[in-house]
Amino acid sequence: MDYSFKNFQKNAIIRFLALDKYNYIKDNLYKCVVSQDTEFQTRFNAFYRVRRDSKWRNTFYTYFESIKNKKNISFDEMLDYMYKETGNIEASFCSKLLSTINPDMPIWDQYVLKNLKLEVSGNNKDEKLENTKKVYKTIIEIENKKLQEPSIQKSIQDFKEYFPEYNLSDIKILDYILWNSR
């Protein structure tokens, strides 16, 4: 057993960021039928804090399974589907679904929005739905610009050197940085 501070520090970061939980999701997505695999669903729910009823989860995971091989599926398409099926604008969960399928797509999260100084406006659900799509496109634009910043590039490089076993995309690492900057 390695009791060094460096090992302690690394393991603490792994637990804090739930890197093993994320790796499980990433590694098992195409090994299971997500609409039927309760282990995968439980781990996805825990990692992404899915707190919805069984009817909602059934809709979500059935949809997830039906699109998981569509690398070119869009956030807008997912958002429209979930809105039609649930009546809710599920920006956060749609982005997490999209990011799971395509790790080069960013996460929509309250902390990411706050750090990027973004919010959704609208007087009714239809306006909010359309504005949500615009805000997500803005997240993509801002994060792509941030990926060009030397300090972000250095942080990503350092992360990859420290945690090579996780093989995370640059956007996923940037999402972790933005999520953790509260």
Image: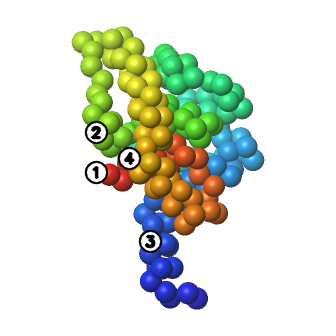
- Seen from the viewer's position, the closer of residues 162 and 93 is 162
Judging from the image, what secondary structure is the residue with disc 4 in?
A: helix
Q: Above or below — where is 69 with respect to 164?
A: above
Q: Amino acid at mark 2?
A: Lys
Contact flag, marks 4 and 1 (Cβ < 8 Å): no
Instruction: Give me the C-alpha separation between circle 4 and circle 1.
Output: 8 Å
The image's colour scheme reads rainbow
Q: Above or below — where is 38 with respect to 60?
A: below
Which residue is label 3 attached to?
Answer: 12
| Residue count near mark 3 (Cα–Cα under 10 Å), binned few <14, some 14–19, many ≥20 | few
Contact flag, marks 2 and 1 (Cβ < 8 Å): yes
Q: Amino acid at mark 3?
A: Ala
Instruction: Give me the C-alpha separation between circle 2 and circle 1.
Output: 8 Å
Q: Is residue 19 toward the left or the right of residue 9 in the image?
A: right
Instruction: Please indicate, yes or no, whether residue 114 appears anywhere in the rendered image.
Output: yes
Which residue is label 4 attached to?
Answer: 178
- Seen from the viewer's position, the closer of residues 94 and 32 is 94
Residue 114 circle label = 2
Instruction: Give me the C-alpha separation between circle 2 and circle 3.
Output: 25 Å
Judging from the image, what secondary structure is the residue with disc 1 in?
A: loop
For the N terminus, the image quarter is bottom right
Tell me which numbered mark, 2 or 4, is placed earlier along the sequence: 2
